[in-house]
Amino acid sequence: MATETEILRPTRLETLRAALGQGAGRRVARLLDAMHPAEIASLLESLPPAQRELVWDLVDPELEGEVLIELSEDVRAELIRGMETEDLVAAAEGLEVDDLADLLEDLPEHVHRQVLRSMDSRDRERLHAVLAYEPDTAGGLMNTDTVSVRPDVTLETVLRYLRMRGDIPDNTDSLFVVNRHDRYLGVLDLARLLTEDPERTVGEVMQSDVPGIAPVTPATEVASLFEDRDLLSAAVVGTDGRLLGRITVDDVVDVIREEADHSVMSMAGLDERADVFAGVVPSARRRGLWLGVNLATAFLAAWVVGLFESTIQEIVALAVLMPIVASMGGVAATQTLTLMVRGLALGQVERANARWLLGKEVAVALLNGIVWATVVAIVAWLWFGQPKIAGVLFAAMVVNLLAAGLAGAIVPLALKRLDIDPAVAGGVVVTTVTDVVGFASLLGLGAWLLR
């Protein structure tokens, strides 16, 4: 259990902001020197632009490249705009090839060229190998810095080779086994290398049942493979079977985090790369598009209500009950939509099981519709003392929850078929469906049965 001292201990952000407020630049610099680049990046993203620039100026130049890689795209672009060319070139030096490939996308063209000129031919070739693939694929994630061995050498020979090499790439848990044509054969686990008889050959102890990953594999599928197989690293293998590079778990964690950010932010029509401390005008511009789309759909719902204006004037109770029907339908649709979007993102929902899921969601909507429509109808009866109004409300809510279940299941599948991100557009569409169906069913039944 946390002590009172631990609870009251200020966070790093609070300590940093206090030091900035006191003008204690040296203290801020010492705090930053004791932090990991990812922690510095998190702090920078937690500061308003003016304070962010002050802190960035105090970051150790040797860490700037690693910090830039950890930042969101908007914040990274903002800091890059304020850096000199020579500082950007220096920041790019020493970065892993896969990290450098990510950074180059955000650098100005003249800086991009200068960074390439500063590299030796071998590193430049390795970088071009990564840049040949889209960033959100296995080829774009991979690092070409690999350690490979032949199957016909002994483990003792491999150990001597590693001692001569002096170091191995970070996050190396196994060596890749290739033939003399660099074609991938399997992996040699480091634990087996250290514990097996050193006179045995690599071919005798290697794992040949560990498939490589094609370079065009989407990053989300790569993340699923790492999760399903509990991988720490994996080989990227071309169509000709040649070893191209490797992907490590730290790269996959970044993919998972980005996908999570995308899912959360897209449900509100926002960009996961957006800077939470961005200026008022850029923030308003980003959010304005989907507010405009939502406004158009709201006018559609208002038009439906307008068709029953005379009914509402005669039966005021319907106007009071309208928000209940629309709200229940909206929540039900959002629940189904969220499950479907998650299932699509994880590869769990496909055409083969879509019909079963549709049937299940209709059954869930019908059951919830009957239960909660009964509750609301009883409340309406007690409230207004008119059983007909309760009956209309019951029927409208059942209809709307059924529409919500259908829309929540069908809309994301349809958007996916149209290559539209359901996480971005799904919420607006299903909300429109439930509003329109809810208002139309309540007011339509009211006009038919109560007048």
Image: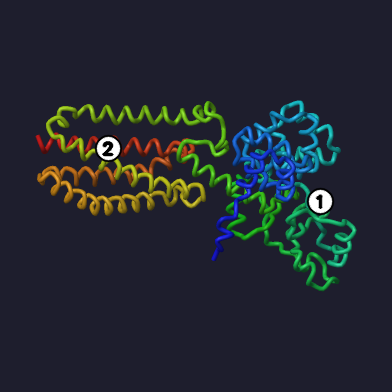
Left or right of 108, for residue 222: left
Q: Is residue 98 visible?
A: no
Task: Identify the residue at horizontal 16%, vertical 38% (top origin).
Answer: 317
Work out whether 87 lies above or below 235: above
Of the 4 image quadrants, the one containing the N terminus is bottom right
Q: Is residue 330 visible?
A: yes
CA separation in Å, label 2 and label 1:
64 Å
Q: What residue would you read off at disc 1?
A: 181
Crowd around label 1: few <14 · some 14–19 · many ≥20 (10 Å): few
Position in image of residue 47 (x %, y %): 60, 39
Does the CB distance between marks 2 and 1 fall below 8 Å?
Answer: no
Please tell me how many numbered marks the rendered image carries. Answer: 2
Name the residue nearer the viewer: 247 or 322: 322
Name the residue nearer the viewer: 201 or 22: 22
Q: Amino acid at mark 1?
A: His
Left or right of 209, for residue 317: left
Position in image of residue 177 (x %, y %): 77, 58
Work out whether 132 lies above or below 178: above
Q: Amino acid at mark 2?
A: Val
Q: How is the model colour-coded?
A: rainbow
Q: Quadrant of residue 155?
A: bottom right
Task: Identify the residue at horizontal 57%, vertical 37% (top origin).
Answer: 273
Marking on residue 437: 2
Position in image of residue 280 (x %, y %): 52, 28
The furthest residue to the bottom: 197
Query: Element type at marker 2?
Result: helix
Query: Element type at marker 1?
Result: loop
* Closer to the eye: label 2 or 1: 2
Q: Quadrant of residue 291?
A: top left
